Each structure stands twice: as C-alpha cells, then as structure tokens.
Image (cartoon, rainbow, N blue to C red):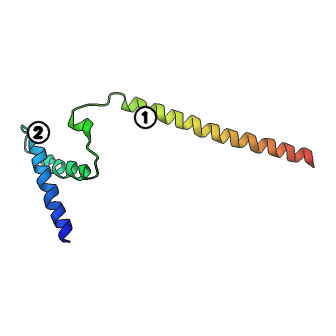
C-alpha cells in the first residue's frame, strides 16, 4: 500500500510539473486534471504520445486504416477461397475414388 501511495505522489508531482512546462499558457479547465494523470501514467510504460506533444497530426491515418482493412479482407478471403477450393477438389477426388 505504501508503494502505491508513493507511486501516486510521484506520478502527480511529475504530471503537474510536465503540464506546467509543456503548456504554460493553458486555461484552467477540468481537462487539465486528466492530462496531469494521463501523460505520466503512460510515460511510466514508455508510451510518450510524441505526436500529441509535438503537435503532429496524422493526416492520412484514416486512409491508411482503410487500406489496411482492405488488405486484411483480401487476405482473409484468399484463405477462405483456398480452403474451399481444397475441400472441393478433395470431395471430387473422393467421389471418383468410389
């Protein structure tokens, strides 16, 4: 229990310091409390969200997602078709063997 309390204290201290250094002119809103906990928690696991911190927006992320989904669908369809063709050829061979 003491470890968790100590971890929360350091997490909040780092979050307040990081928030004040990254966004010095931010308007005080309740959203800041979320950011104070969110960024330090994920930086503990080395997920730094650099695209958000540097202000980079991924313009083609939705386009890339649709391309990936299309390729995945093609891959799954090819597996299903290959499996069906194999089962059809097996049943034809079995029918001729009788």
User: Residue 10 location in percent, x, y?
Assistant: 14, 58
Task: Give the number of the disc on residue 52.
Answer: none
Q: Can you say whether 52 is above or below 5 in the image?
A: above
Who's the residue at 53% across and 33% down the image? 71
Task: Give the number of the disc on residue 65.
Answer: 1
Who's the residue at 25% across and 38% down the image? 50
* Relative depth, front residue between 69 and 46: 46
Disc tally is 2
User: Residue 62 location in percent, x, y?
Assistant: 38, 32
Quadrant of the frame with the N terminus: bottom left
Q: Can you say whether 86 is above or below 7 in the image?
A: above
SS for callout 1: helix
Residues at circles 1 and 2 in contact by the CB criterion of under 8 Å: no
* Relative depth, front residue between 11 and 66: 11
> Which badge, 1 or 2, comes first in the chain's sequence?
2
Graded by Cα atoms within 10 Å as few (under 14), some (14 to 19) or many (20 or more), the crowding at tag 1 reads few
- Which residue was labeled with disc 2? 23
User: Residue 65 location in percent, x, y?
Assistant: 43, 34
- Foreground tag (1 vs 2): 2
């Amino acid at each position: 229990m003491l470890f968790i309390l100590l971890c929360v204290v350091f997490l909040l201290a780092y979050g307040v310091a990081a928030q004040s250094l990254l966004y010095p002119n931010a308007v005080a809103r309740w959203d800041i409390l979320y950011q104070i906990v969110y960024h330090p928690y994920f930086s503990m696991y080395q997920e730094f969200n650099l695209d958000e911190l540097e202000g980079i927006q991924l313009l083609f992320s939705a386009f890339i997602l649709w391309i990936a989904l299309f390729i995945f669908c093609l891959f799954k369809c090819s597996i299903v078709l290959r499996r069906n063709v194999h089962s059809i050829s097996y049943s034809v061979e079995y029918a001729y063997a009788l």
